[in-house]
Image: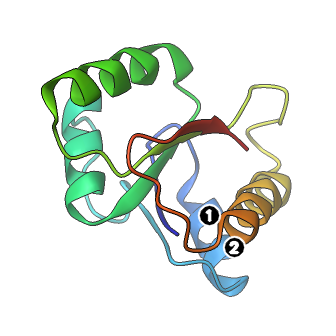
Amino acid sequence: MKVCLDEDISPDVAAILRSMGVDATSVHEAGRQGFSDREQLELASAEGRVLVTRNRNDFILLTQEFFAKGLPHAGVLIVPWTIPPDNFRLVAKRIAQYVKRAGDSPSEYLFDFV
């Protein structure tokens, strides 16, 4: 499972994930700050990456819309606010654990929490 971190997650988390062997990118690293949620999801899906975000409410609606319209959707993982945003190592650890459990499972229209 490849992941792309939304702009509400520090790009430092992507670097930590890569050091843990996870194929991870960040919208910060790609220069996509300020893009709409829809654009972020479209671009992550085009790259075959699950979008990792804290923005649960907007991405629930987008996932429903993409499914109803049959639009490409590589999945969304939510990092809950109970995990402190400045604890980069813990955020990375939870994402890496999820990725390891998921393995090569299909992620199309996935919507889950780490």
- Report, in whole angstroms, how far the alpha carbon at label 1 lies from the one at label 2: 6 Å
Residue beneath disc 2: 16
Q: Return the x and y of residue 42 as percentages of the image width and height.
A: 20, 45
Nearer to us in this view, 52 or 66:
66
- Residue at the location (45% across, 19% down)? 60
Residue 3 placement (x, y as % from top left): 48, 62
Rendered-image quadrant of the C terminus: top right
Q: Residue at x 47, y 60 (%)?
A: 106
At 61% from the left and 78% from the top, the residue drawn is 22
Q: Is residue 8 left or right of residue 78?
A: left
Q: Amino acid at mark 1?
A: Asp
Quadrant hosting residue 66: top left
Which residue corresponds to mark 1? 12
Please rate how many residues cluster around mark 1, counting C-alpha atoms within 10 Å: few if below 14, some from 14 to 19, many from 20: some
Residue 40, by quadrant, is top left
Which secondary structure lies at badge 2?
Answer: helix
Q: Height in image: 34 above or below 49? A: above
Q: Residue at x 62, y 36 (%)?
A: 112
Q: Nearer the viewer, mark 1 or mark 2?
A: 2
Q: Is residue 101 visible?
A: yes
Residue 19 rendering spot, x and y as whole percentages: 69, 85
Position of 103 relative to 114 (above/below): below
Circles 1 and 2: CB atoms closer than 8 Å: yes
Q: Residues within 10 Å of mark 2 (few under 14, many from 20)?
A: some
Q: Nearer the viewer, residue 91 or 85?
A: 91
* Amino acid at the residue labelled 2: Ile
The image shows residue 40, relative to residue 47, as above or below, that is above
Badge count: 2
Local secondary structure at mark 1 = helix
Residue 70 image position (x, y, % from top left): 16, 34
